Image (tube, helix red, strand yellow):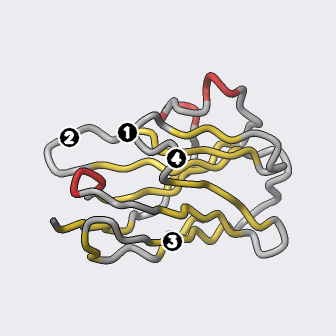
């Protein structure tokens, strides 16, 4: 089970940290991801991390602004979002793959088996 939190309305240039509680199994071989979906648009990849923490991937649109991390003790995955822009407005979803994905597959939605319900992020200009 994945439960996201932390979404809210902020102004351009602001920061937010999204959290995802991961429960219901062991995750040593999992890959965790964040995706987002803006109104009228398809869901898109944001960032991913292997549960081991050894590999991360970030979409070009968020590189240098967003950072994915995880706390293996707390079973939490985070998305630190800085320098937010209006185009970051979307529902953000936490996702889990039961596999330790190779870097080139981390951005593929079809690689993820479990999804949270989403949390809304709104960035106003």
Mark 1 and mark 4: span between their CA atoms?
A: 18 Å
Question: Which is in the foreground here, disc 3 or disc 2?
Answer: 3
Mark 3 and mark 2: span between their CA atoms?
A: 23 Å
Of the two numbered discs 2 and 4 on the same chain, state the one appearing first in sequence. 2
Q: Residue 92, image x and y in percent?
A: 39, 58
Which part of the image, by quadrant, shows the N terminus?
bottom right
Answer with left or right where residue 50 lies relative to residue 6.
right
Mark 2 and mark 1: span between their CA atoms?
A: 9 Å
Question: Which is in the foreground here, disc 1 or disc 3?
Answer: 3
**Residue marked by disc 3:** 17
Dot label at residue 41 = 2
Tag 4 secondary structure: loop
Q: Residue at x 32, y 77 (%)?
A: 8
Mark 1 and mark 3: span between their CA atoms?
A: 19 Å
Marks 2,4: beta carbons within 8 A = no
Q: Residue 32, image x and y in percent?
A: 64, 49
Q: Residue at x 37, y 39 (%)?
A: 44
| Residue furthest to the top | 104
**Residue marked by disc 4:** 64
Tag 3 secondary structure: strand
Graded by Cα atoms within 10 Å as few (under 14), some (14 to 19) or many (20 or more), the crowding at tag 4 reads few
Q: Residue at x 16, y 51 (%)?
A: 39
Of the two numbered discs 1 and 3 on the same chain, state the one appearing first in sequence. 3
Marks 3,2: beta carbons within 8 A = no
Answer with left or right where residue 107 lies relative to residue 71.
left
**Residue marked by disc 1:** 44
Tag 1 secondary structure: strand
Front in this rendered view, residue 68 or 45:
68
Tag 2 secondary structure: loop
Q: Residue 76, image x and y in percent?
A: 68, 69
Answer with left or right where residue 27 lies relative to residue 1.
right
Marks 2,1: beta carbons within 8 A = yes
């Amino acid at each position: 089970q994945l439960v996201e939190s932390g979404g809210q309305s902020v102004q351009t240039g602001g920061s937010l940290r999204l959290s995802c509680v991961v429960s219901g199994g062991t995750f040593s071989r999992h890959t965790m991801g964040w995706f987002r979906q803006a109104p009228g648009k398809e869901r898109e990849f944001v960032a991913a991390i292997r549960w081991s923490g050894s590999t991360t991937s970030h979409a070009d649109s968020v590189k240098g602004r967003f950072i994915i991390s995880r706390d293996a003790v707390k079973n939490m995955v985070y998305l630190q979002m800085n320098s937010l822009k209006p185009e970051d407005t979307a529902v953000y979803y936490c996702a889990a793959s039961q596999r330790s994905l190779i870097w080139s597959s981390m951005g593929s939605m079809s690689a993820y088996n479990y999804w949270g319900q989403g949390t809304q992020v709104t960035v106003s200009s």
